[in-house]
Image (cartoon, rainbow, N blue to C red):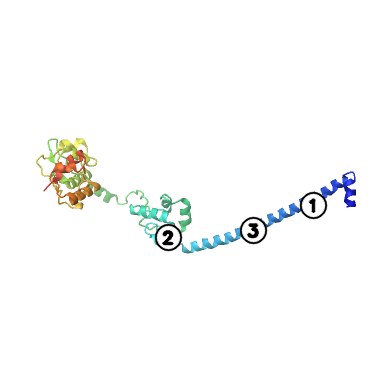
């Protein structure tokens, strides 16, 4: 006790020296502890990284072993799943193919929904496009070697008879004309004539000029060559007996309206006339007016 008392009774210089020594010691001790913690953390991090690297290599080798050459135009969903391709990408590819889509190059895959450039790069060496799906290059024009034969072909083509067109005074009945007759109308060729005939067959015959404009590519200028016999009989649908397929096949009856008609017949029985059909609210008034010439209430 006397020693400590002598120290503290001194001028104070000894006290300062003592506290300085203690502070230096503590600071060095704290520094050593911090350094040890940092070294420990680094070792732990390195160990985890090494483990993750080993695991990643194992997974990568496992996926690589499951890969196999495939044609995206014909490969099935099971094979794609086995190669590690997720369900979203599989659904996207199969949906594209159902719509008659063709994968002609590996880059076409990247344009599909849910597919990316990275996916294509990963799979590129396994993608094998069949010859029938590859995009064919246009052949370059070459001067034919046999000029005499070529000249004879041109002469033959020049002599090929073309469809003669009607004169100004000719008009034809659209409900009875065949394709060859329609093609004689100026401006109407095989495409437009086939469209008119298909529409006529689906409807059961035309009853007004306005219906002709429902045909794709039909032009008002064609009307001066065409007419519709007002006494012509339309092919009618027996509304109380027609099947689901017969009803929905008509252009003026939608899928929802077909279901509603079938339900009405099942619940309430026969549809006696147009007024009853109006009260069902299955058709709007303008829709019903277009449909009535094709309906029989027998």
Residue under the image location 66 percent in, 56 percent down: 41
Q: Residue at x 15, y 43 (%)?
A: 276
**Mark whose residue sits in front, 2 or 1:** 1
Residue at disc 2, secondary structure: helix
Distance CA(mark 3)–CA(mark 2): 37 Å
Secondary structure beneath disc 3?
Answer: helix
Q: Which one is in front, 32 or 3?
A: 3
Of 70 and 131, the residue lying toward us: 70
- Whether 253 is drawn above or below 74: the answer is above
For the residues labelled 3 and 2, say whether their Cβ atoms are less than 8 Å apart.
no
**Residue 74 spot, x, y in % from top left:** 37, 59
Of residue 262 and residue 167, the one placed in the foreground of this image is 262
Q: Residue furthest left?
A: 231
Q: Residues within 10 Å of mark 3 (few under 14, many from 20)?
A: few
What whole-number distance in Å separates the C-alpha atoms at marks 2 and 1?
65 Å
Work out how far the residue at label 3 is from the one at label 1, CA to CA, in angstroms: 29 Å
Residue holding disc 3: 44
For residue 46, side relative to residue 103 (left or right): right
x then y, percent, for residue 101: 35, 52
Local secondary structure at mark 1: helix
Q: Which x, y percent locates residue 144?
A: 32, 50
| Left or right, residue 64 beside residue 12 | left
Q: Do the residues under discs 3 and 1 have CB atoms within 8 angstroms?
A: no
Residue 96 against residue 192 in the figure, above or below:
below
* 3 or 2: mark nearer the eye: 3
To which residue does mark 1 refer? 25
**Sequence-first disc among 3 and 1:** 1
Q: Are marks 2 and 1 in contact (CB under 8 Å)?
A: no
User: Closer to the N terminus: mark 3 or mark 2?
Assistant: 3
According to the picture, the residue beneath numbered tag 2 turns out to be 81
Query: Does any portion of residue 108 appear in the rendered image?
Result: yes
């Amino acid at each position: 006790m006397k020693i400590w008392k002598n120290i503290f009774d001194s001028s104070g210089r000894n006290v300062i020296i003592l506290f300085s020594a203690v502070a230096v010691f503590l600071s060095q001790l704290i520094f050593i502890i911090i350094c040890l913690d940092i070294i420990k953390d680094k070792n732990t991090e390195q160990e985890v990284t090494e483990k993750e690297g080993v695991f990643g290599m194992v997974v990568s080798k496992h996926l690589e072993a499951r890969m196999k050459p495939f044609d995206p135009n014909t490969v099935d969903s099971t094979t794609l799943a086995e190669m590690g391709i997720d369900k979203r990408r599989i659904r996207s590819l199969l949906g594209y193919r159902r719509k008659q889509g063709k994968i002609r190059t590996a880059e076409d895959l990247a344009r599909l929904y849910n597919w990316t450039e990275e996916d294509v790069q990963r799979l590129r060496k396994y993608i094998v496009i069949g010859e029938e799906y590859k995009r064919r290059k246009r052949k370059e024009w070459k001067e034919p070697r046999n000029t005499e034969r070529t000249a004879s072909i041109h002469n033959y083509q020049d002599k090929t008879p073309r469809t003669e067109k009607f004169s100004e005074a000719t008009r034809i009945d659209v409900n009875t004309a065949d394709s060859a007759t329609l093609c004689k109308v100026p401006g109407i060729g095989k495409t437009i004539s086939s469209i008119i005939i298909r529409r006529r067959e689906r409807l059961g015959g035309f009853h007004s000029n306005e219906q002709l404009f429902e045909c794709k590519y039909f032009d008002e200028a064609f009307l001066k060559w065409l007419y519709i016999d007002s006494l012509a009989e339309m092919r009618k649908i027996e509304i109380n007996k027609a099947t689901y397929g017969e009803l929905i096949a008509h252009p003026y009856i939608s899928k929802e309206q077909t279901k509603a008609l079938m339900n009405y017949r099942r619940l309430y029985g026969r549809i006696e006339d147009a007024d009853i059909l109006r009260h069902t609210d299955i058709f709007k008034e303008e829709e019903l007016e277009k449909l009535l010439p094709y309906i029989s209430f027998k």
